[in-house]
């Protein structure tokens, strides 16, 4: 993990967290960690229990964070046992009220829950190596025949007749084996009909329970990309189903799939890229259906003949990937949508208005940093970078968040100018898109990559004298270190003597103007130091018994005490008091002296007088030392997720320490003894 250090001014915030929005008060709790948010996730799938009126369960399938479960209509969420899995499909058999069965399709297989989504077990027998499930459909006769179908990324359809415990191929006649949608006829007991929507072959139909398939594409474009299928609940009578395509919008068939007719009415261009479809349970009477797209939600009340924008209250231009309606929709008007990075939203007026329902939904994947403004004591400004979700900004110390536009798609590091009050300059490093620069406090961004040989930027370090020297260093994952002396207009490699290309962290001396010193922590070769502003590097590893160094911390009084710390994998913490020439292990009080992995370090900005240092371990939580590392004490009361990845201290009147862990929610803790009125905000996140 890379941290970004801003030294020479007040030591500020650097951490990792999941993002979203929450109105929970951000700073509370004395002597114990408490959660505050923000919350959110990339939601790929949603499911509402058929027993919702009496048992209001909602499940959300997320990218890289598994299935989340709500038992109170989405007001709060809890993770299931599928953490770290990417879920793209959720379904349950019609006899859910009796069986409590729920199915989940993931990028790494099929999973079954027998307790309404609380816990899950893999069930991949017969699916082949590395099955990637994209769609699930159980028969309406499941209670009698135990039949369920899955559509896969590249191996077609599989069928199980024992509730998913074993699978057989069911793809005879399919000419496109990437199956993205499945729908079973409500009259399956009589007609044995199943529909499959494919990536490049349009729609296929089976009228023998999946034994064989034929194309059903009359009226569809050749090679149509079908993302969603929805069958009328009254299919036996009206023979109606809908297909949502990614290129040409919505099509309807009223003859059981024999022919298709476009039903795009007044849909805008963004609505023609269909990601999800859902029909009202009372469709035969109300003719209502909803469509999810990159342009948000659209609603039709005339069977798709015309459409209306249904995005009031939603984040603009956030793709909607999943839609689920209450089985009592006719009475309660309730439906849920799953968005790309915006979590779950709920409407209780049939889509007229929306509100986020993300409390404790901690699944936004990897959030790679959080960093405060150098003027944090007065402006309360904090930035968060999330994997695939861009950068978010809070102007109230993390209570609420807004997503910034045109930011890097995979931000991994941030550096804020020490002259931020006047120049408003921010840099963001991205894993794949290089360095971005903003000159208006994050409102707009531009790429500044000229001369940058690697676009996988994992660490940034800005000169404490940036207003004068315009110097910034970028550490990359695979390309070593780059330097700019003109604020990012031009970069050059500065790797002479650097024996590793994978940079985990950079730390720049608070007195860089006079000592020209920068340290680099590497993935496989320990610590390197330059004392000539990147002209050449030398190893600084004497005494280090672990050369995988994850984090560095450098004293604010480095010019006099020459003190710095290194956090390593499997070797714990090392201290140097001679500017990195020699190191000694300082693990007294840490768990597993020779095996503990330290992912984050942070020093009090008044270290010279209080000798206070914080360590985040990769699996055992946060530790504090009040004697410059001689001994350590755990600070974990209430911190149930102890996989800490980042720490940073904010030198405000309150003193705020931020910590990042795996997951995606925030916590805060007030500690009144180490540093006066110290608060801790825990910001969970996944370690790269």
Image (cartoon, rainbow, N blue to C red):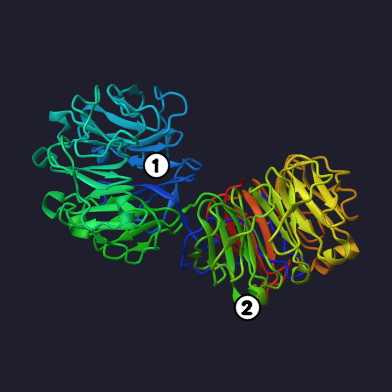
Q: How many numbered marks appear?
A: 2
Which residue appears at 78% of the width and 67% of the height? 469
Which residue appears at 22% of the width and 59% of the height? 332
Where is residue 365? Give x, y as percent: 52, 49
Q: Is residue 468 left or right of residue 414?
A: right
Question: Where 21 sits versus 110, above or below?
Answer: below
Q: Count neighbours of disc 2 (C-alpha within 10 A) and say few if under 14, some if 14 to 19, many if 20 or more.
A: few
Question: Where 409 sits versus 230, above or below?
Answer: below
Residue nearer the viewer, 569 or 169: 169
Q: CA distance from mark 1 to mark 2?
A: 43 Å
Q: Dots 1 and 2: beta carbons under 8 Å?
A: no
Q: Is residue 529 left or right of residue 188?
A: right
Residue 147 lies in quadrant: top left
Where is residue 197? Give x, y as percent: 29, 36
Which residue appears at 32% of the width and 55% of the height? 269
Q: Count neighbours of disc 1 (C-alpha within 10 A) and say few if under 14, some if 14 to 19, many if 20 or more.
A: many
Q: Which residue is mark 1?
A: 88
Q: Is residue 228 visible?
A: yes
Q: Is residue 622 visible?
A: no
Where is residue 592? Give x, y as percent: 73, 42
Q: Is residue 284 left or right of residue 326?
A: left
Where is residue 309? Give x, y as percent: 27, 62
> Which element type, helix, strand or loop, lies under badge 1?
strand
Residue nearer the viewer, 111 or 199: 199
Q: Which residue is mark 2?
A: 378
> Which element type, helix, strand or loop, lies under badge 2?
helix
Residue 72 lies in quadrant: bottom left
């Amino acid at each position: 993990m890379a941290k970004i250090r801003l030294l020479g001014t007040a030591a500020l915030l650097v951490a990792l967290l999941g993002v979203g929005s929450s109105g929970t008060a951000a700073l509370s709790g004395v002597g114990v960690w408490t959660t505050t948010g923000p919350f959110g996730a990339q939601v790929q799938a949603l499911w509402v229990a058929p027993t919702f009126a009496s048992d209001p369960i909602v499940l959300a399938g997320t990218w890289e964070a598994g299935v989340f479960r709500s038992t109170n209509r989405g007001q709060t969420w809890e993770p299931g046992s599928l953490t770290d899995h990417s879920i793209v499909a959720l379904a349950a058999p019609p006899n859910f009220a009796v069986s409590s069965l729920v199915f989940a399709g993931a990028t790494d297989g099929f999973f079954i829950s027998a307790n309404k989504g609380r816990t899950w077990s893999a069930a991949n027998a017969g699916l082949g190596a590395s099955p990637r499930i994209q769609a699930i459909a159980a028969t309406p006769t499941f209670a009698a025949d135990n039949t369920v179908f899955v559509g896969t990324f590249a191996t077609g359809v599989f069928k199980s007749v024992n509730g998913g415990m074993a699978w057989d191929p069911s793809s005879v006649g399919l000419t496109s084996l990437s199956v993205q949608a499945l729908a079973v006829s409500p009259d399956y007991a009589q007609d044995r009909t199943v529909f499959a929507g494919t990536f490049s072959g349009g729609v296929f139909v089976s009228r023998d329970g999946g034994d064989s398939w034929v194309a059903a594409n009359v009226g569809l474009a050749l090679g149509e990309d079908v993302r969603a299928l929805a069958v009328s609940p009254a299919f036996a009578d009206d023979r109606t189903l809908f297909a949502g395509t990614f290129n040409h919008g919505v099509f309807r068939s009223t003859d059981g799939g024999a022919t298709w007719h476009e039903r795009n009415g007044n849909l805008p261009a963004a609505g023609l890229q269909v990601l999800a479809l859902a029909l009202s349970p009372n469709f035969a009477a109300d003719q209502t259906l909803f469509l999810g797209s990159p342009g948000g939600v659209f609603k039709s009340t005339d069977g798709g003949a015309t459409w209306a924008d249904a995005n009031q209250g939603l984040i603009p231009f956030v793709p909607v990937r999943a839609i689920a309606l209450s089985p009592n929709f006719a009475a309660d008007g309730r439906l849920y949508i799953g968005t790309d990075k915006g979590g779950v939203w709920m409407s209780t007026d049939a889509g007229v208005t929306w509100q986020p329902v993300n409390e404790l939904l901690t699944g936004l994947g990897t959030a790679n940093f959080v960093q405060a403004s150098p003027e944090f004591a007065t402006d309360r400004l904090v930035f968060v970078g999330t994997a695939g979700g861009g950068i978010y900004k809070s102007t109230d110390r993390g209570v609420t968040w807004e997503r910034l536009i045109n930011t890097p798609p995979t931000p991994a590091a941030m550096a804020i100018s020490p002259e931020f009050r006047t120049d408003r300059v921010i840099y963001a490093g991205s894993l794949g898109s290089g360095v971005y620069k903003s000159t208006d406090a994050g409102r707009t961004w531009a790429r500044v990559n000229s001369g940058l040989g690697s676009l996988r930027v994992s660490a940034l370090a800005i000169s404490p004298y940036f207003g004068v020297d315009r110097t910034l260093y970028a550490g990359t994952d695979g390309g070593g270190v780059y330097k700019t002396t003109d604020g990012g207009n031009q970069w050059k490699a500065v790797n002479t003597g650097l024996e590793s290309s994978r940079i985990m962290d950079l730390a720049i001396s608070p007195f860089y103007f006079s000592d020209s010193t920068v340290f680099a922590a590497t993935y496989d070769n320990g610590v390197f130091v330059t004392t000539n502003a990147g002209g050449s590097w030398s190893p600084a590893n004497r005494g280090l018994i672990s050369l995988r160094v994850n984090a560095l911390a450098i004293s604010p009084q480095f010019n006099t005490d020459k003190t710095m710390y290194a956090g390593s994998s499997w070797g714990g913490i090392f201290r140097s008091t001679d500017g990195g020439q020699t190191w000694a292990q300082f693990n007294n009080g840490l768990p597993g002296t020779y095996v503990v992995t330290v992912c984050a370090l942070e020093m009090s900005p008044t270290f010279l007088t209080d000798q206070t240092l914080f360590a985040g371990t990769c699996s055992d939580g946060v530790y504090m030392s009040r004697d410059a590392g001689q001994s350590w004490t755990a600070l974990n009361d209430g911190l149930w997720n102890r996989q800490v990845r980042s720490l940073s201290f904010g030198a405000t009147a309150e003193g705020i320490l931020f910590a990042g862990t795996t997951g995606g929610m925030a916590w805060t803790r007030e500690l009144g003894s180490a540093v006066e009125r110290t608060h801790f905000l825990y910001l969970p996140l996944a370690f790269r």
